[in-house]
Image (spheres, rainbow, N blue to C red):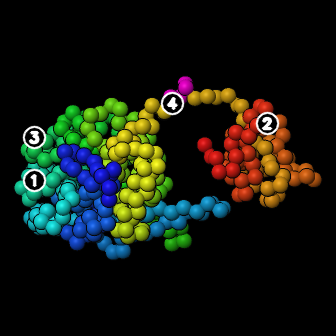
């Protein structure tokens, strides 16, 4: 791995901004070592929960949800993974073992239900030698009343409490299911967080329609997959310009371009989990190789030059060009007469004639037929009928 990918994160030197997220892939020293051997820049250990029931995960705990809409097929990774199986003493021992076995930074992760627990667990992780501490304040999910405070207030209070008791770099792992992620990020930074994770997994419900019962143990579970990336990208792009603390992007990474997207929005590091479950630890090497290829192709001297570059290009609502200056045009030589364009046109702007399908004057230029044409037989043309968007040139 070249020096191109070297990154500084919460005061730690990483050989790559691609790091292993807290999950079973980092549940033991053996798993963490595999992450390191395949190129992870750091590991976030599987979370230690004070709530003991969460330490015993039921089986099975993983499920793949397939989604089909015509020719479009996607999937979700649905998981009831739960926490580390250990108590705090055994967890601290694994931190010490990891520090002896690994060269990359080891970041502990804790979730507690009491003030005493947050302080005790944080101190024990620090004493065991963890390089940083990720506070899993994303559970419980949502903006609900919790111990006299709403969740946003509770998160900020937890960070303040831990900050006053340990000197470790602190990372606050936030839930996507908050009323105002921006305000929470600002509050935890003010209370001492050195970084925020945007975001933990969504929590949802999958139902077996035939059996008419919930999938996986009769309750809610986490779900992720490539579909999940747009939401954290949106919030990172908004949070990055307003905070001094660093951002760890998390959710939906499937290929190197996803890592690039996170960095462009302002993330310092990018956490990977689902892709490893689906394809193995080798994912880290592929992501690093793809990221390095992108940097070399663009002529960057280091990965930091990529960070936040998309921000100046983002437009507000009043800045969007709203002219209807494009219309669709069907190339009859490429058209297979499948009729997809006519079926998806909500402006009824495509007619069927003896010559094939043709676009009439009601075309709004929305581009739906353009993106749905299975043979890319449709181009978008301007007022002069010059092709502006054609095959292989989506924008």
Q: Earlier in the sequence, mark 3 or mark 1?
A: 1
Where is residue 218? Give x, y as percent.
39, 67
Q: Are marks 3 and 4 in contact (CB under 8 Å)?
A: no
Of the numbered discs 1 and 2, the one sitting upstream in the chain is: 1
Q: Residues within 10 Å of mark 3 (few under 14, many from 20)?
A: few
Which residue does the numbered mark 3 point to in the structure image? 164
Asked if residue 65 is positioned above or below residue 148 in the image, the reply reads: below
Q: Disc 4 vs disc 1: Cβ atoms closer than 8 Å?
A: no
The residue to which callout 4 is attached is 315
- CA gap between label 1 and label 2 equals 66 Å
In terms of sequence position, does the residue under pointer 4 or pointer 1 come before the other?
A: 1
Q: Position of residue 91 (x, y in %)?
A: 14, 64
Where residue 115 appears, x then y in whole percent?
13, 47
What is the magenta range? 315-319
> Which residue shows up at 9% across the image and 46% down it?
166
**SS category of the residue bearing label 2:** loop
- Residue extending farthest to the right is 354
Dot 2: few (<14), some (14–19), or many (≥20) neighbours within 10 Å?
few
- Residue bearing the label numbered 1: 126
Snapshot quadrant of residue 274: bottom left
State the count of labels. 4
Q: Main secondary structure of the magenta part?
A: helix
């Amino acid at each position: 791995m070249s020096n191109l990918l070297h990154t500084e994160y919460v005061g730690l030197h990483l050989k790559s901004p691609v790091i292993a997220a807290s999950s079973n892939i980092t549940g033991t020293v053996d798993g963490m070592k595999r992450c390191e051997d395949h190129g992870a820049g750091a590991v976030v250990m599987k979370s230690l929960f004070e709530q003991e029931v969460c330490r015993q995960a039921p089986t099975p705990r993983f499920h793949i949800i397939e989604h089909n809409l015509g020719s479009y097929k996607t999937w979700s990774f649905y998981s009831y993974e739960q926490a580390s199986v250990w108590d705090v003493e055994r967890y601290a021992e694994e931190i010490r073992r990891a520090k002896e076995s690994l060269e990359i930074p080891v970041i502990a992760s804790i979730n507690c239900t009491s003030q005493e627990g947050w302080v005790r667990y944080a101190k024990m992780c620090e004493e065991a030698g963890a390089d940083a501490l990720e506070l899993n304040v994303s559970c419980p999910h949502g903006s609900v009343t919790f111990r006299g405070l709403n969740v946003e207030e509770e998160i900020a209070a937890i960070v303040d409490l831990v900050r006053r008791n340990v000197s470790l770099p602190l990372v606050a792992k936030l839930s996507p299911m908050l009323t105002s992620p921006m305000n929470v990020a600002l509050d935890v930074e003010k209370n001492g967080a050195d970084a925020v994770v945007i975001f933990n997994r969504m929590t949802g419900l999958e139902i077996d329609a035939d059996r008419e019962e919930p999938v996986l143990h009769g309750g809610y579970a986490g779900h992720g997959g490539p579909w999940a990336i747009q939401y954290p990208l949106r919030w990172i792009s908004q949070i990055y310009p307003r905070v001094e603390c660093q951002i760890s992007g998390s959710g939906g990474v499937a290929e190197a371009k996803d890592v690039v997207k996170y960095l462009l929005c302002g993330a310092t590091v990018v956490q990977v989990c689902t892709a490893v479950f689906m394809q193995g630890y080798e994912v880290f090497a592929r992501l690093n190789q793809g990221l390095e290829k992108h940097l070399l192709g663009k002529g960057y001297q280091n990965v930091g030059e990529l960070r936040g570059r998309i921000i100046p290009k983002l437009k507000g609502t009043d800045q969007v060009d709203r002219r209807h200056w494009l219309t669709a045009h069907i190339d009859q030589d490429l058209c297979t007469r499948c009729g997809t364009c006519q079926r998806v046109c909500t402006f009824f702007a495509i007619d069927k004639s003896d010559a094939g399908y043709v676009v009439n004057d009601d075309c709004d230029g929305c581009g739906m037929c353009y993106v749905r044409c299975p043979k890319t037989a449709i181009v978008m043309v301007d007022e002069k009928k010059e092709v502006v968007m054609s095959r292989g040139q989506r924008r």
